[in-house]
Amino acid sequence: MKDMTMKLLKILTLFILLLLSSGYASNSTDEALHLLVENDVDFAIAKDIQKTTRDKMNLTIYYDNYLGIVDKLLTDKKAQFGILPHDMMLYKKYLERDKTFINKVKMIMPLYDKHIHILVRKDQNITAIKDLKGKRVNTNIGKNSFSLTGEIMKYKHNISWKTSHYKTNIAIEKLLKNEIDAVVLIESKPSKSLSEISKGSLDKLTLLSPELTGDYPVAYLNKRDYSWLNKEVTTNLVSVILASYNYHESKTVKRFNYYTKNITNVVDLITLDIDRLRERGYYLWKNIEPFYYRKVQWPLHSLSKNAIHKDMDRLDSFTNTIGMKFVTIDAGNLAMGSDNPALPADEQPIREYKLNSFHMLTTEVTQKQWLYIMKKNPSFFDAKKLNHHSDLNPVENISFKDAKFFIDTLNSLEGRSNYRLPTEMEWEYAASGDEHNLSHYAWYGANSSHETKPVGLKQPNKWGLYDMLGNVWEWCDSPYTKDYNSDIGQNGFMVLRGGSFINLPANVRNKNRMNNRDTIRRFNNGFRIVYDKNSIAKDNIKYRVQLHDTLSGIAEKFYQDSKRWDIIFYANKSIIGRKPSNIKKGQVLKIPFIRSVAFGKTKSEADRDITENRIKFLSERNMVPFSDPSLPHGGMLNHILEASMDSIGEEDYTINWENDATLFFPYLKEHKFDVGVGWLKPDCSKPNLSKETTARCEFLFSDPIVNKITTFFRIKTKKQKILTVNDLKGKRICRKKGWYVFDLEEQGLIPGKTIHLIQPDSMEKCFNMLLNSEVDYVAATKIVGNQITENMSIDAQIESIEEISTLLSSHFIVHKSNPRADEILDKVSRGMHKLIANGKMQKIKMDHAKNFFYKNQ
């Protein structure tokens, strides 16, 4: 019996030892766990982690290359932690075609960022990443971060190059000797490797943009980083992360609990020790923020750019049920608008507001989020149009009412009423920030390739909000007013803010205002939402189910949209059960309150949208050979207009005619017409502009269409004195009423001060007054003046003053308050660019010039 007892004790002891050695015991703090690193920088960080966690776990540090680290994390139970570049995951996904890998190794917390440097010589003809095709490119030694990122660059840009693996200092020497063509260097700025190179050598080098989007955050390198750089270079970041195997509960529960506890302990211990680490640890700890990841979620965070961008994970942020991330906008005071008279009138004057705190969505609402709630994607720039996934692109082509309906549906699905659009004041307050480096923060006309971009690629503002400027205009829950002195909004017109991917910088400002009717959908209009904790829920309606009722029929009854049956279903799932078809007579259902009208539109509403979308051009009569309905194609300018619209497939436009030039500005300002054809552009930056020129500066101008010579006409005499501008001062000068005067002002001929300006309602009257000595000179474009004098048969008596002439450019113009201004000018400009590229622009001009001069010979 005693022997049997001893045997049982030995077996039990052996079993306990086996448990301890395999890690199943809950207090197994002595098991050696491996923390794997590749280089000395990561080793220094790992040593600090080892010291911080030594009382809780036994961490041993091992060197390996990045591919080796990944393999060990997947196969070696002791290899629990690794320090990796985030694009290691991309390498496995793209180059090794391992789509499951990203679910196996996940990020615990971000550590630091490294900047991609691509060094080339200034004397090389290498200006873009595609120019490296077939070139000799160095990516350092072995399968390190440099070479992995290099392989991804080749994959992304579909190019190949001849790879060498010299150490950085040797590679740069070879680059200077023209033995290789480029050096890939991935180090935090300013690079220590580059600091070891002599300034004389560096002056021969420059940096190339890696042009990586989507998977890599954007950053910038400039003279503050490297004095030898001539201009700012856009680059990308490789984020270095602390990673682990992603344990799932499908594993043995005790072992799962043991390892996940270790990982949580690491984050907690680093958080508690962060002050000491920043003071005494490796210098990079000063930028590491572990408390963003204090609460470790399982499975571990997905390795996406949103997880890497630390700015999005503030302590006071939260994520809702469909993955929307919100940050707190603290209470404060807002000086809304501007007192700058050069800015549009609707931005004036300044008004003071005191705002309560609120939560705002960090990005514009994405197509994926919209699709989840609304089931159908209305976006113009969808996956088919972009030829790639559009889940993270902002949803657009939606009206104000569509946005409201989305919000009501989201509120209903979550059983709350806290979500809403921001007011105009809240939007401007949240958008405050640095606008001087617009390309760092915004997608706009100069950098967007005229399409929307995935949200969150640019730098965030001080609140952690992305794309507040550019990408898409954002609807606000505020009626549009013509200025801030008025509290009465224009009926049916709502405010949009922020500018879009097709806008000029002048419109991509945090104080700039735009408006649209609340039913209008545009391909550059989107929205973001806020969460208002103080919002009071509306009472639900109660409805008793009748015989033959269906959820879609009830939705049609209350929402005018049968497709919204799911709102009622999710609000009553505990009553209906798992199947929507299980509703029964007598059941009392809650009908969630929805403020918006149905998402669908009636035929009359759709027809009205078509009419409102039509572009209305306004052209002046009697401007031969430029514009007149009697001319072929309505004259040179209108022929260019027609050809431009045809080249981009735009058919929904009209050309209208007006003889009275004084009506153009009011018509365009009141949006009775959209575009003025063939107007000259002043220099709006000059001080002390006249009222007429200031009014002209309220317009946006297209690219130049055609140049015009403006000059002065006088009576012919046998001995004519050669005149200067000074000879015209104090004289009586005639020009048609409603025409420009800025060319006179720019020459010092100020109406009412240095000249007497007479303005009848036609140029013919000007020339009659000249013949009758009622004026001294007539000011007009040379070609129009010559045509009018010939038509009046007085060309033998009149001559132009060749020595006083000005060359001005003619443009299409749209008033800045027109909600479609940028969209229309973009269409016109794209059309003109096509005409220039295929040679049709020059042919149209020559045809009209030949026709004009042939008739007048």
Image (tube, rainbow, N blue to C red):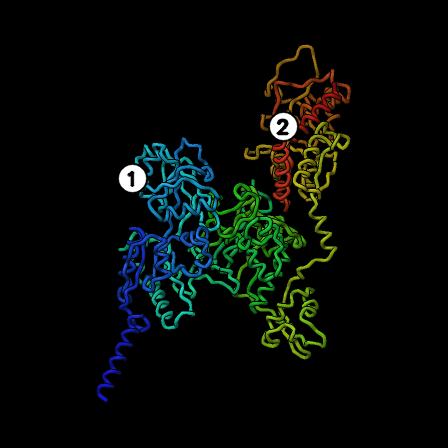
Q: Amino acid at mark 1?
A: Glu
Looking at the rendered image, the disc whose residue lies closer to the viewer, 2 or 1, is 1
Residue 6 in the image: x percent, y percent? 23, 83
Residue 60 in the image: x percent, y percent? 27, 60
Q: Amino acid at mark 2?
A: Asn
Q: Is residue 618 left or right of residue 70?
A: right
First in residue order: circle 2 vs circle 1:
1
In the displayed image of the protein, which residue is found farthest to the bottom?
A: 1
Q: Residue at point 23% right, 89% down? A: 1
Where disc 2 sits, the SS reads strand
Separation (CA) of disc 2 from disc 1 = 55 Å
Residue identifier under label 1: 196
Circle 1 Cα neighbour tier, 10 Å, few/some/many (<14 / 14–19 / ≥20) = few
Residue identifier under label 2: 707
Number of numbered callouts drawn: 2
Q: Quadrant of residue 479?
A: bottom right
Q: Quadrant of residue 844?
A: top right
Of 116 and 72, nearer the camera is 72
In the displayed image of the protein, which residue is found farthest to the left?
A: 2
User: Contact (CB < 8 A) between labels 2 and 1?
Assistant: no
Where disc 1 sits, the SS reads loop
Q: Quadrant of residue 775?
A: top right
Q: Quadrant of the C terminus?
A: top right
